[in-house]
Image: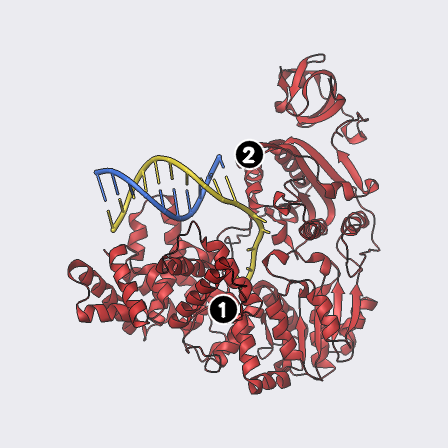
Chain colours: A red, B yellow, C blue
Amino acid sequence: MDVSELLDELNDKQREAVAAPLSNMLVLAGAGSGKTRVLVHRIAWLMQVENIAPYSILAVTFTNKAAREMRGRIESLMERPLNTMWIGTFHGLAHRLLRAHYAEANLPENFQILDSDDQYRLIRRILKAMNLDEKHWAPRPIQWYINGNKDEGLRPEHIDTHGDHTQQKMREIYAAYQEACDRSGLVDFAELLLRAHELWLKNPDVLAHYQRRFRAVLVDEFQDTNNIQYAWLRLLCGHENSNIMIVGDDDQSIYGWRGANVDNIQHFLKDFNDASTIRLEQNYRSTATILKAANTVIDNNQGRLGKELWTDGDDGEPISIYAGFNDLDEARFIVAQISSWQNQGNQLRESAILYRNNAQSRVLEEALLHQGIAYRIYGGLRFFERQEIKDALGYMRLINHAHDDAAFERVVNTPSRGLGERTLATIREQTRLQNCSMWQASLQLLQDGGLKGRAANALNQFITLITDMASECSELALEEQANKAIKQSGLYAMYQAEKGEKAQARLENLEELVTACKQFVVPEEADEMTPLSAFLAHASLEAGETQASGDQDAVQLMTIHTAKGLEFPLVFMAGVEEGMFPSQMTNDEPGRMEEERRLCYVGMTRAMKKLYMTYAEMRRVYGQEKYHTASRFLREIPSHCVEEIRLTSTVSRPVPNRFSKAASHERMEQSGFTLGQRVSHRKFGEGVVLNYEGSGDHARVQVNFDEFGSKWLVLSFAKLEAV
DNA sequence: CGCGCCGCGATTTTT
DNA sequence: TCGCGGCGCG
């Protein structure tokens, strides 16, 4: 490949980053500025021009999807597979290191990964074992505490409790949890990172090997790194010849609440003080109007690294702000716009509805359903997180490694085989006494006659089941092992006996699991592992899609968080109200408010051509009627970027042209509505109708309220209330 | 041991 | 409003 090809279609700044000499570098890449393109071309440049072997390149991303995409794009650019290049998530790479150096990392060879649900269950079990009341010691905060400390690189013995009783107890729980994990050979997500860090810290020779090996390190979405991830990178690149390129955008840091630390960008500049900074500010995605609005909003945040997106494209359409009477009205408005967009010959999949929290999707779904518009919702349970799948994986985990207590607990009585709380308590007690796994404890109890009668019988059958399956599986292909785990365990029969759509879907998912096993290719780096073990690791590290993608043309519904990194020609941001967005939970804390504002910035910059931002004056939140005012973020948008399809709260204003078509008297009267009529509005009380205008499903009604003067209300016809 | 009822709590999500 | 988890009964 000709080297110039790598630079040809890049702008000056992009070219500067791609062709920079080997050095440490920060690329501040604004939304839609061609960030991935720069990363991909940079890697190609390193191979082509700097003669760095793929084997010596490490690229880190945050999601498996991003890693896959990056690998795919580099391989298609280079027109060859690049298997020796390490491209993956922090967790995936840490896992790989731990597999390769399990002994140095003090892990058993067949250690298993605990996902967050497994972790939660294990913590609850620990609490029970410690005789702690869950009311007082809620498992969620404890899980948060454990992971938070691990993210900071802290083991229980490193934590200073300041003699505080609660703190001491928390530390104790953390320690007990960790002991349980170690005993069963279980590693949670945060542990992967922490162990990988400790591995390098305690084994300088291992670290030196990787420092020598990786001549180039690249990190995507650097603003999302947490402290342990940064510490890990610092170890790897803490040598004279380091060559690390970090790419990120402080304005798109929206994961502070889960430990991401934007300040890592500043730390990087301090720790790698020879690093140069390149700003990518030219945007290839949105109209000038959208960029202007987004820039102005984000400018309200303090202490930014500074960056202003620009485009050489057109202004495009103004941003439309719609004030709905309530959430239903808002949803219907959005659906009406999508419908007309579709009628103009556009694809539904080019439109997205974004919201702050998942509960908001419900009304939107109903409205879409009502109009018969196809939609796809992102979020919810992923494939490998589903109950039946986790059950099946539980059996597979026991087949793979019988001492996996988390798996043992999960399936020992699923389907029910007469092993209840009583028996389990006995097994757990034995586990505690012998400091061994539940599997071992069970064998012991059966041998010593510590269990009798039906319980002993049932436990014996369970042990035999797992033993038999394990020995029969050793010769089978992976999908046959999965099939065996599902059928022979009685799982399949259990869900067959259940009736209803739900159970049917579960059976289909179980079949799907077998298919997934069939299609699973053991990755090259895992060639030392058994296919089963590799598959189990894959299932934990990559939870899979939330929904079978299907190729139906559909509107995309998701939270703004989920939308990060995506783009759509037509975007709706719904529920842009005080209390919803920014969220109530923000509590006006400045730092959290700024993260909300960044989230707003992320949402707005998803839109390519047209952006609608909508809110509802009244909405049902947790079954209660809430009155909200327009979000402060809306007020931060310059008025010349905006077209308001709404009332203002105190002034009556002329109706814009697009609404000049008067609503027919007939239509209004059908809705039980006439001029001069007394009506009520939930927010403003009683008033008299002075005027109305409108089109489509919506009317603008001018009402005079004694107390508040005259107002235009944008209402859907059905929402008028006569007194 | 399993089922059903009641009470409580409730962003954002990837690995 | 809704879903989950605890508890009590059969």
The answer to which image quadrant residue A152 occupies is bottom right
Disc 1 or 2, which lies upstream in sequence? 1
Let me know if residue A9 appears in the view.
no
> Where is the C terminus of chain A found, in terms of image quarters?
top right
At a point 46% along the width and 60% down the height, the residue shown is A169
Q: Residues within 10 Å of mark 2 (few under 14, many from 20)?
A: few
Q: Which residue is drawn at 59% across and 69% down?
A: A228
Q: Which residue lies furthest to the front in this view?
A: A163
**Residue linked to disc 2:** A370
Q: Residue A694 placed where, x, y %?
A: 73, 25
Mark seen at residue A349: none
Above or below, A117 against A573 in this view is below
Numbered-mark total: 2
Residue A440 is left or right of residue A188, and the answer is left
A523 is higher (above) or lower (below) than A339: below
- x, y percent for residue A485: 32, 64
Could you say where residue A40 lies in the image, as x and y percent from the top left? 69, 70
Q: Position of residue A610 (x, y in %)?
A: 73, 45
Nearer-the-camera pick, A599 or A319 = A599
Of the 4 image quadrants, the one containing the N terminus of chain A is bottom right
- Which residue is situated farthest in the top direction here? A676
Q: Residue furthest bottom?
A: A205
Chain under numbered label 2? A
Of helix, strand and loop, which one carries label 1?
helix
Q: Tell me the CA gap for discs 1 and 2.
A: 54 Å
Task: Find disc 1 in the rendering and name its residue.
Answer: A156
Q: Which amino acid type corresponds to the residue marked 2 in the rendered image?
A: His
